[in-house]
Image (cartoon, helix red, strand yellow):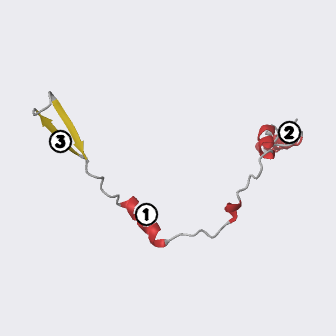
Amino acid sequence: MILILCTGLLAGCAADYLNHYDSVTLAAGDSQKFNSLLQTVDPLNPASKNTRIEGDGQRAAAVAQNYKFPPPPPPPPAITVNVGGAGAGVTTNTTP
């Protein structure tokens, strides 16, 4: 019984506190965000209202397949090393 009475008293204090807060609204303090949104020319992209998203099912399936099983990486380029011959030292030529 005493527990219910204490809970009721505390709940009444919390409601009274929320009714007498020191700011104008609960969102007070967001003036910088409000001012930046106020100066934005058009914050809503008109294309966001388009609910018809065009796409090709075969292309989407191919992309999903590439994510599932990625293609193998390309082979490294062939490297030719010439030792001796007309030049002095070692010459390294890379051929694609």
The quadrant in which residue 34 appears is top right
Query: 1 or 42: nearer the eye?
Result: 42
Q: Position of residue 46 (x, y in %)?
A: 71, 60
| First of labels 1, 3 by sequence position | 1
Q: Position of residue 47 (x, y in %)?
A: 67, 62
Q: Relative to residue 23, is residue 78 depicted above or below?
A: below
Query: 33 or 94: nearer the eye?
Result: 94
Q: Relative to residue 69, is residue 28 depicted above or below?
A: above
| First of labels 2, 1 by sequence position | 2
The quadrant in which residue 16 appears is top right
Q: Position of residue 52 (x, y in %)?
A: 63, 70
From the image, tell me which residue sits under label 2: 17
Mark sitting on residue 75: none
From the image, tell me which residue sits under label 3: 80
| Viewer-side label of 3, 2 | 3
Residue found at the far top of this picture: 88
As helix, strand or loop, the secondary structure at mark 2 comes to helix
Q: CA distance from mark 3 to mark 2?
A: 82 Å
Amino acid type, callout 3 = Thr
Q: Is residue 8 left or right of residue 68?
A: right
Q: CA distance from mark 2 to mark 1?
A: 57 Å
Residue found at the far bottom of this picture: 57
Query: 10 or 43: nearer the eye?
Result: 43
Q: Is residue 10 left or right of residue 66?
A: right
| Viewer-side label of 2, 1 | 1
Amino acid type, callout 2 = Tyr
Mark sitting on residue 63: 1
As helix, strand or loop, the secondary structure at mark 3 comes to strand
Amino acid type, callout 1 = Val
The quadrant in which residue 72 appears is bottom left
| First of labels 3, 2 by sequence position | 2
